[in-house]
Image (tube, helix red, strand yellow):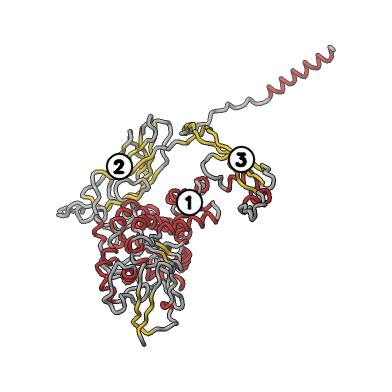
């Protein structure tokens, strides 16, 4: 035992010597880092009704699955699939309604499964909710920019205003960089004096610090201040009054009319203001037009809104368009009708930033202000929305999708986003949106629901924003740069019209070809590269981009040789006397009526 104890002491001493021989560890210093901001979370207690459902077999009333849902109404398909499994779900989905063919037949003879609501009871749960972050809004002070071109008579200040949504917290400072130079202001407001910039403007980055211990997201603005005249000449002596054109592009802008697509592209309008077709006037009355629209006149005559009985041909040269006599007879009503949407167009332009004159020109070109539906071509509303067009709105305008989707699908499906839901759900949304802009109404005066037509104007404006987003992505993918750095403001709108009318494939192919030839992305060079199947978009763009041309779309521009005309909103009464001999070959002699029980056309051809 003594020997073992001695050996243990030797080993222990040796271990101590070995340990002492090791180098001393370096001191560990705390790594300097910015502490993580506290998360804005709160816990809410939610009271609700919990519903118990059973999936039961008809044959023997066997309860094959029990599950709970926390909403009113029937369970949605995904809930049944998750709770009961794919096998039972598919069997239930394939089960047809139990139909008893004779008094002797019992329910137990029916195959498959049925849903049974067993009970409901009150329940509650605690939910952690993320509270909103602070925000910062942008405007200008010292000047109210006036049209045209956002003119100011003095250099303004850029005003950054912080907003704290939590009631017991405040904004303690606003900071950021102006063209790379840092700034900081105490409190919830920061006024930054502006100086003239170059044509490309300068970038401002800004954010707000909160007493909660966190900060808002970082925001950006592109600011351009251009002096006009020679009042700034170093020689002096000019009699010109100071004048500046002031433009601010930012998602946080709150200083007047929005510039949604400008902000998306990072593109300033031309100094002094854009071309007339891309303007929003100060008053909706300035949108007034007095164009002889043959198709609109024809629909007003066919629906009994205009008496053209004095015309030899009844006022109609085809079932869709008015004759010369019909246009004269309907002129006053045509002018009144094409201007009845002006105020709503103007209001929507103020809210969305899509130019009012552009919207009106599109409606004139697409539908001649008749907001019905063409069933053969599945186009509806003032802007003739198709399912492909609806797809663009829902995919490329997420904010609109978030508002519209819950009207059609369950919120849990909408939360996934348009690109992540099933194709049949996307098809349902597309169809619902096309139906929503269709103002055809068999029981309404003139066959049109005007309240629905007014609502559809906002949908088309949101659609243009979606097209702006898609154009910006196409150009960014092909050039690696922002849209505003490779094309002018007006040409970007022309590209957007091509995208709206012919589709992104036509635009992307033309842009790719122009780039491969080393050409700048101007309208002339890109339009020259459009494929033959896409070249009709050139006339479409030219028609819309000339405000003063008296936009007169070809009344039957959608009719191609050998194809029947589209099926328009069925007029309540119609009479067409052709001014040429009867023939059987022209497609206009064949018009399929959507509701023949309400309206049967009487065809009469002049003797040859």
**In which quadrant is the N terminus drawn?**
top right
Q: CA distance from mark 2 to mark 3?
A: 55 Å
Marks 2/3 in contact by CB < 8 Å: the verdict is no
Q: Does residue 284 appear left or right of residue 488 in this picture?
A: left
To which residue does mark 1 refer? 408
Q: Does residue 382 appear left or right of residue 103 in this picture?
A: left
Whole-percent x, y for residue 141 in the image: 26, 43
- SS class, disc 2: strand
**In which quadrant is the C terminus drawn?**
bottom left
> Which of the two residues, 204 or 585, is positioned nearer the viewer here?
585
To which residue does mark 2 refer? 159
Whole-percent x, y for residue 451 in the image: 34, 55
Mark 1 / mark 2, whichever is N-terminal? 2
Mark 2 / mark 3, whichever is N-terminal? 3
Picture residue at 24% right of the left edge, 58% below the top: 285
> Which of the two residues, 235 or 516, is positioned nearer the viewer here?
516
Does residue 279 lie above or below 528 as drawn? Answer: above
Mark 1 / mark 3, whichever is N-terminal? 3
Disc 2 residue crowd, few under 14, some 14–19, many 20+, Cα 10 Å: many
């Amino acid at each position: 035992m003594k020997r073992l104890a001695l050996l243990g002491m030797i080993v222990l001493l040796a271990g101590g010597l070995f340990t002492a021989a090791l180098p001393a560890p370096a001191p560990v210093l705390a790594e300097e880092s910015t502490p993580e901001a506290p998360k804005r979370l709160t816990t809410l207690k939610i009271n609700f009704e919990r519903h118990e459902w059973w999936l039961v077999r008809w044959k023997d009333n066997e309860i094959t699955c029990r599950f709970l849902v926390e909403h009113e109404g029937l369970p949605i398909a995904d809930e049944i699939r998750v709770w009961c499994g794919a096998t039972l779900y598919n069997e239930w989905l394939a089960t047809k309604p139990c139909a008893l063919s004779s008094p002797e037949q019992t329910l137990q003879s029916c195959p498959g499964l049925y849903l049974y609501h067993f009970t409901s009871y009150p329940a509650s749960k605690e939910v952690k909710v993320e509270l909103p972050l602070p925000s910062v809004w942008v405007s200008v002070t010292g000047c109210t920019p006036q049209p045209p071109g956002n003119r100011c008579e003095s250099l303004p200040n850029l005003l950054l205003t912080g907003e704290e949504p939590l009631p017991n917290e405040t904004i303690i400072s606003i900071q950021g960089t102006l063209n790379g130079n840092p700034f900081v202001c105490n409190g919830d407001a920061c006024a930054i004096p502006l100086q003239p910039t170059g044509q490309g403007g300068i970038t401002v980055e800004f954010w707000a610090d909160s007493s909660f211990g966190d900060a808002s997201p970082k925001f950006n603005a592109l600011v351009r201040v251009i002096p006009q005249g020679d009042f700034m000449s170093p020689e002096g002596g000019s009699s010109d009054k100071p004048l500046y054109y002031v433009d601010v592009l930012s998602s946080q802008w709150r200083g007047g009319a929005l510039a949604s697509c400008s902000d998306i592209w990072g593109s300033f309008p031309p100094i002094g203001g854009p071309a007339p077709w891309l303007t929003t006037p100060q008053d909706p009355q300035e949108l007034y037009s007095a164009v002889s629209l043959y198709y609109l006149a024809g629909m007003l005559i066919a629906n009994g809104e205009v008496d053209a009985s004095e015309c030899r041909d009844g006022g109609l040269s085809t079932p869709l368009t008015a004759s010369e006599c019909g246009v004269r007879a309907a002129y006053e009503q045509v002018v009144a009708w094409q201007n009845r949407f002006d105020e709503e167009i103007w209001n929507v332009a103020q809210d969305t930033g899509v130019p009012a004159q552009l919207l009106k020109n599109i409606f004139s070109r697409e539908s001649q202000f008749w907001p019905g539906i063409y069933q053969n071509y599945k186009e509806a509303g003032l802007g003739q929305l198709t399912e492909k067009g609806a797809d663009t709105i829902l995919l490329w305008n997420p904010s609109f999708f978030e508002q519209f989707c819950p009207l059609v699908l369950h919120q849990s499906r909408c939360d996934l986003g348009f690109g992540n839901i099933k194709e049949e759900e996307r098809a349902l949304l597309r169809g619902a949106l096309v139906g929503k802009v269709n103002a055809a109404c068999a029981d309404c005066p003139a066959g049109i629901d005007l309240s629905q037509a007014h609502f559809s104007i906002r949908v088309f404006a949101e659609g243009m924003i979606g097209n702006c987003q898609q154009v910006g992505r196409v150009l960014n993918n092909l050039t690696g740069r922002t849209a505003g750095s490779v094309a002018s403001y007006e040409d970007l709108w022309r590209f957007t019209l091509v995208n709206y009318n012919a589709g992104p494939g036509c635009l992307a192919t033309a842009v790719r070809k122009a780039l491969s030839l080393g050409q700048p992305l101007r309208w002339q060079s890109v339009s020259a590269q459009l494929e033959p199947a896409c070249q009709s978009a050139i006339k479409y763009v030219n028609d819309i981009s000339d405000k003063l041309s008296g936009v007169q779309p070809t009344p039957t521009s959608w009719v191609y040789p050998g194809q029947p005309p589209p099926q328009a909103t069925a007029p309540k009464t119609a009479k067409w006397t052709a001014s040429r001999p009867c023939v059987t070959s022209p497609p206009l002699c064949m018009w399929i009526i959507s509701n023949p029980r309400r309206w049967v056309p009487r065809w009469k051809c002049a003797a040859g």
